[in-house]
Image (spheres, rainbow, N blue to C red):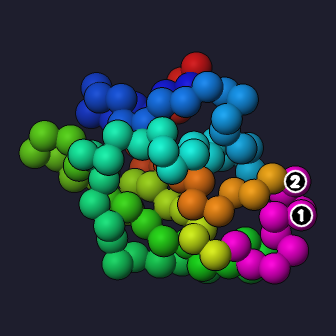
Amino acid sequence: MKAIWNDTIVAEADKGELIRIEGNWYFPSDSLKREYFQDSDHHTVCHWKGEANYYDVVVGDKKNDFGAWYYPNPMEGSIERVGSDFTDYVAFWNGIEITE
């Protein structure tokens, strides 16, 4: 599976390594091509997964604000609900395409 933005693969992993949560594919953190990611100070809260941290995705001179998110400390009970430990797994949105 690949996460593509601005005609560039920003993350890539075998489908079996990903976790599907609420319609989103979450990539293992080691599958990210780190040169395209910058820490963001943006955060949101999911009532059952906890606080999400974000990355800005930067390719060339284009920046996708808050284009990727992850949960560094999932809320108690959420890992059991998902059935897999999704700590630090990264999901994408805001125009970042996920393909097989």
Residue at 75% across, 57% down: 85
Amino acid at dot 2: Gly
* Residue 10 position (above or below residue 58): above
Instruction: Name the residue tied to disc 1.
Output: 80
Would you say the residues marked 2 and 1 are in contact, meaning their CB atoms lie under 8 Å apart?
A: yes
Residue segment shown in magenta = 74-83
Q: Is residue 14 visible?
A: yes
Residue 10 placement: quadrant: top left
Tell whether position 77 is magenta: yes
Can you give x and y, in whole percent of width and height, for residue 32 in the image?
42, 43
Residue at 70% across, 73% down: 74
Q: Nearer the viewer, residue 35 or 97?
A: 35
Can you give x and y, in whole percent of width and height, for residue 52 in the image?
56, 72
Q: Is residue 56 left or right of residue 12?
A: left
Can you give x and y, in whole percent of width and height, for residue 46 in the image?
68, 75
Please tell me the numbered disc located at residue 67.
Answer: none
The answer for how far apart the CA atoms under marks 2 and 1 are is 5 Å
Can you give x and y, in whole percent of width and height, for residue 19 in the image?
71, 44
| Label 2 residue SS | loop
Residue 86 placement: quadrant: bottom right
Instruction: Name the residue tied to disc 2.
Output: 83
Q: Is residue 56 left or right of residue 79?
A: left
Q: Is residue 8 left or right of residue 90?
A: left
Amino acid at dot 1: Glu
Residue 56 placement: quadrant: bottom left
| Label 1 residue SS | helix
